Image (cartoon, helix red, strand yellow):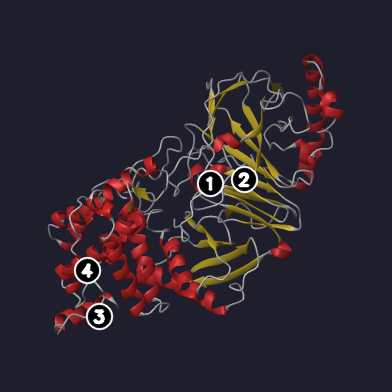
Amino acid sequence: MKNRRGSFWSHPSTPSPKNRRGGDSYINSSASHCNGDELNTIAYPSVISVNPCLSHPLSCFWERGPGGEGCQNDRKQLRISFCVTICLSMILMSLFLTKFEITAAADPTTDIAYILNLENDKHTDSVFIDMQIQVEPGEKIIQVQMPAWSPGDYHIQNHGQYVNNLFVIGSDTRTLRAYDVRWDHPDANTWNIEPNGATILNISYRLKTTPPGIFSENVKISKNEAFFNGPSTFMYVVGHKNRHITLTVLHESSWQIESPFASHRNREIYSGLGEYTALDYDTFADSPILAIRKNSLKTWDFNSDGAKYRAVFFGGETPIYSDVRYQDALKKIVHTENQMMGGPSSLKYIFFFDMNGTGGGLEHLNSTRIALPVNMRLKSFATFVAHEFFHQWNVKRIRPKVLGPFDYINPPRTRNLWFAEGVTEYYAWMCAFRAGLISKQDLLRHFARAISSLEQNPASRTITADEASWKVWESGNSEGFGGLSYYQKGEMIGLCLDLQIRHITHDHSSLDDLMRKLYLQCKPPALGYDEDDILKAANQLTQTYLTPLYNQLARSTSPMPFAESLAFIGLNTAGEPVDHPSNEQLYEQSQWLK
C-alpha cells in the first residue's frame, strides 16, 4: 500500500466494549422502536436469506405512525405478526426462487452464504448484508466478528462499530421451523449467538458509509456508485474462516458489479443478480467490490502474458482515461513485472482507479484500489501503479507467515514490513525504468534524494528497520515507528542489497533472483516465510555469509553502506559518475540498469 499525498485521516475513537443481551431475535439491538429497518432478515430454509425491507412487499407491514408510535406493539403481538410474515414470505419466496433459480446456499461445497443487497431505493446512503451460516452438530455458541483492521492498513479501525440494525434468526432445514435465538455483543467487533437447536442462522445488518482507512475507502455509498472493502463490510465465523463462501449481489439492472471474484456462473442468473464464490474468508475479504451505474463505467481491458487485466475508473471524470499514454504505461508496467517474476501470479487482475479518492493505494490478492489525482503526471502514475501491482507478489504471496491466514482481531506483528513495503518501492522505480517510463537521470536523482533524506533523518540513528516494522501498531500511521518510515529505509535496503548481491556473485545473481526464489518458496499453498527466511534465502542464493551485511542494513542503526554499494557501479551517493570508472564498474552498472 502507498500514500502518495502523505495525508492521514483521523479516526473515531474506539467505543467502549458493550455487553448486552440480544433477547428474542426479532427485537432490534440499536433502536427502541420498529422503523421498518429493524426486521432485517427472514430465514428461507436451505436457500438464501434476503432483506424483506428491500425486496419483499410484506416487510413493512408494521407501519410507523407519527414519531414511530405505531410500532409500539407488545411482545405477543410482535410474535404473531412475525410468524405470519415468515410463513407468507416463505411461500412468496418459493415462487420467486423457482422462477429465477437462485440457490446461493445449495452448492454442497458452500458453507457460508452472503447477500449484498443494493436494490434499496429508500436508503441510498446504506446497504443491507445478509449472512447465512450452517450450524455444525453440537455447536452451542456461534461467534461472528467484524475485523478490527484491514490487511495492508496496519492500524486499528474496529469495523464492528459501524454495524447497525443487527438481526438474527434461526431455522431448521427439515421442519421449516423458525427459532428464537439469543445473542450478546461483548465487545466492539464480536457477537456470540446461541443456535438453540437451529441448523441455519441468518444474520442481517445494515452499513452506511464508514470512515476511510489510511490507504483506501472502507465502505463508501453514493447515489451512482458504491465501493466495499471486504474486511469493513463482511463478518466472519470465528474458527471457520476456511469455509467456502458464496456471495450473491442484488442490484438494479442499470448497475454493474466489478470485482476480482471468480464468477460462480458464466452469466448473471438474471439481470440485476450476480453470484460469486471464494475458497475462504481471507480470499473473500481480499476482493473489493465496486457497484457502479453502467452509463458511468469506464474501463481499459487488455491481455498480457496470458492473463486478463482491467482498469476501472470511478469517482469522477479524468483526462487520464482518454490519454493513450497512461494506458500504454499501465500495459508496460504489467508486462515488465510479469516478466521479472516469471509470469502472472493470477489469470485475472483489476485496477480500481478512484479519481481524487481518499488515501493512496491498497493492495489486494488479485486487484488494487488506487486513489489518483485527476491530473497526475505520467511518471508519478507509472511508479505509483508499479508499486501497487508488485504487491501481488511481494506481501500477497511472498509474505510473512503472520500475514495470512489472518488474525483480524489481534494485530499481527512482523519485523519484515520494510521488505514488504520498502523493497516494493525499490522495484516500483526499477520497473518503471525498465519499462522505459522514466529515464536513467530520473532513477538516479530519485535514489540520491532518498539517500540524502534518510541520512538527514535523526530517527535513522535510533530506530532500526526491523523495529519500525514491529512497532507500527503503536504509531497508528501504517508507515513506521519513532519517525522512521519502513518505506524509506526498506527501499534503501533494497538498493544496497541488490548492488551487494550483484557484486558478490559477479552479476550471476541479483535481488531479482532473491524475489523469484522467495516467490517459489512462499506462494500458495505454502504459508509464507518465517522472520529469518529472507536472510536464509539470501545466504543460499549467494552461497555467501551475508548475515553481517543483512544485520547492518535491517537490524542496526549503523550508517548504511551507500558509498561502497554505489561504487560497485561507478556512482557516488549523489548519483553522479565517479572519476575514471573501471570497465568492471561500468559493466556492473549496465547489468543493474538492464
Q: Give the distance between the C-alpha atoms of the residues marked 1 and 3, in whole angstroms.
A: 44 Å
* Residue with the mark numbered 3: 590
Q: Give the distance between the C-alpha atoms of the residues marked 2 and 3, in whole angstroms.
A: 51 Å
**Callout 3 touching callout 4 (CB < 8 Å):** no
Q: Can you tell which of label 2 and label 3 is closer to the viewer?
A: 3
User: Percent from the top left, x then y, of residue 126?
Assistant: 69, 43
Q: Can you tell which of label 4 and label 2 is closer to the viewer?
A: 4
In the rendering, which numbered label is found on residue 284? 1
Residue type at tag 1: Phe
Q: Can you tell which of label 1 and label 3 is closer to the viewer?
A: 3
User: Of marks 1 and 4, which one's residue comes earlier in the chain?
Assistant: 1
User: Of marks 1 and 3, which one's residue comes earlier in the chain?
Assistant: 1
Which quadrant holds residue 487? bottom left
Q: Secondary structure at mark 1?
A: helix
User: Of marks 3 and 4, which one's residue comes earlier in the chain?
Assistant: 4
**In the displayed structure image, the side of residue 493 where residue 131 appears, left or right:** right
* Residue with the mark numbered 4: 499
Residue type at tag 4: Leu
User: Percent from the top left, x then y, of residue 495?
Assistant: 27, 65
User: Of marks 4 and 2, which one's residue comes earlier in the chain?
Assistant: 2
Which residue is drawn at the image coordinates 78% and 41% (left, top)? 55
Q: Residues within 10 Å of mark 3 (few under 14, many from 20)?
A: few
User: Of marks 1 and 2, which one's residue comes earlier in the chain?
Assistant: 2
Residue type at tag 3: Ser
User: Of marks 2 and 3, which one's residue comes earlier in the chain?
Assistant: 2
